[in-house]
Amino acid sequence: MGRFASWVFCFIGIWVVLQPSGALCGEVRLKNGDRLTGRLVRFEGGKLTLATDYTGDIHLDWVQVDCISTEGVHTFRFSDNTVLRGIAECPQHGTIRVRDPDTGSARTLTLADLEAINPPPQVRYKGNLTAGGSASSGNTESQAYYGAGRLEVRSKAHRLTLSAKGNYAESDDATTAQNASGTGKYDYFLTEHVFAYAQALLEQDELQDLNLRAAAGAGLGYQFFDTERLSLYAEAGASHVDEDYEDAEDRSYASGRWSVGLQWQILPDRVRFFHLQEGYVSMEDTEDFYIRTEQGFQFPLIDHFFCNIQVDYDYKNRPAPDKEKEDLRYLIGLGYSFSN
């Protein structure tokens, strides 16, 4: 029943993808007479970002804008620190009227006084929770469960990322999967794109004979993109790894570490792709390396819920004796996202 429910959720998600977009649109009128339609994302630092289905995000110089109007509610901050929240209307050239949809009251100001649209909070957070499972009875008695969570808290110069996940499965009273992991990482942005980081990893896998793998280290990273639609970073540094095995000989070594993270809304508000990769290679023996990855797609359902289709792939070049080098997991479930 659990497996059937997971597939139902995913079919609903794919159905939603095929439906016409319900995203509220806006219109930007330029001083040269052109008109552009799309979803108003943000205006800050003299740049207006408009998300479109036909060419992705468009970045416009504010000096080119003559008037804007929106269907949805946005937050507008003006140079005198006045903050209005409402629907934007275009009464005449060079002005903006912000109307409160609840009370109907409106205020008209000049575009020259507009300082920001949808300004981000000084401290932002976003995250998600996902869970899934399956069960069968009859000729084969089996059950499987997984759960995961991720939280990112970001200010201009600081970013904290926490994540945790776990898997359990059994078939005919025999355990076929039992593992869990947790990560924590702190980034300090030296510039807009360059950051220094400190990270930690804790991991357990009963079927790999692993009681605990603990890693901690530091390094440098580069944030290539960090927008609502596309986020991409890469980082490299050094870590110390301790591996405590149930039967095999324990290991402790210094390692190099790399990591890549990608989150991409292929179709805005419809399809999101993600890929996270982390690798450790021993500085004493480069044949001893470990790579852990997770990648997949998320399909919005309703409100903050989404269907999650994910593949986790781990590779340990020198596992415990008589253990496999590769672990591959296919996960399907339901997720809930949150942000401010």
Image (spheres, rainbow, N blue to C red):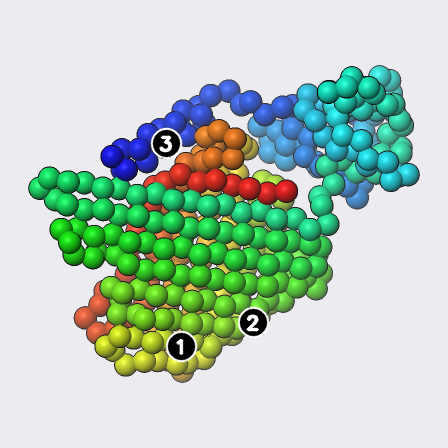
Quarter of the image for residue 132 reads top left
Q: Pointer 3: what residue?
A: 9
Image coordinates of residue 275 in percent, x first then y, are 45, 50
* Relative horizontal placement of residue 336, taking residue 312 as reference (left or right): right
Dot 3 or dot 2: first in sequence order is 3
Local crowd size for mark 1, using a 10 Å CA cut-off: few (<14), some (14–19), many (≥20):
some
Residue type at the position of mark 2: Ala
Q: Please report the residue visible at 55 percent of the width from the left and 57 percent of the height from the top.
A: 161
Badge 1 element? strand
- Where disc 2 sits, the SS reads strand
In contact (CB < 8 Å): disc 3 and disc 1: no
Q: Badge 3: few (under 14), some or many (20 or more) residues near its Cα, within 10 Å? A: some
Q: Quadrant of the C terminus?
A: top right
> Which one is in front in this view, the residue at disc 3 or the one at disc 2?
3
What amino acid type should be assigned to the residue bearing mark 3?
Phe
Q: Which mark is residue 218?
A: 2
Is 103 or 200 nearer to us in this picture? Answer: 103
Residue furthest out toward the left: 139
Residue 242 disc label? 1
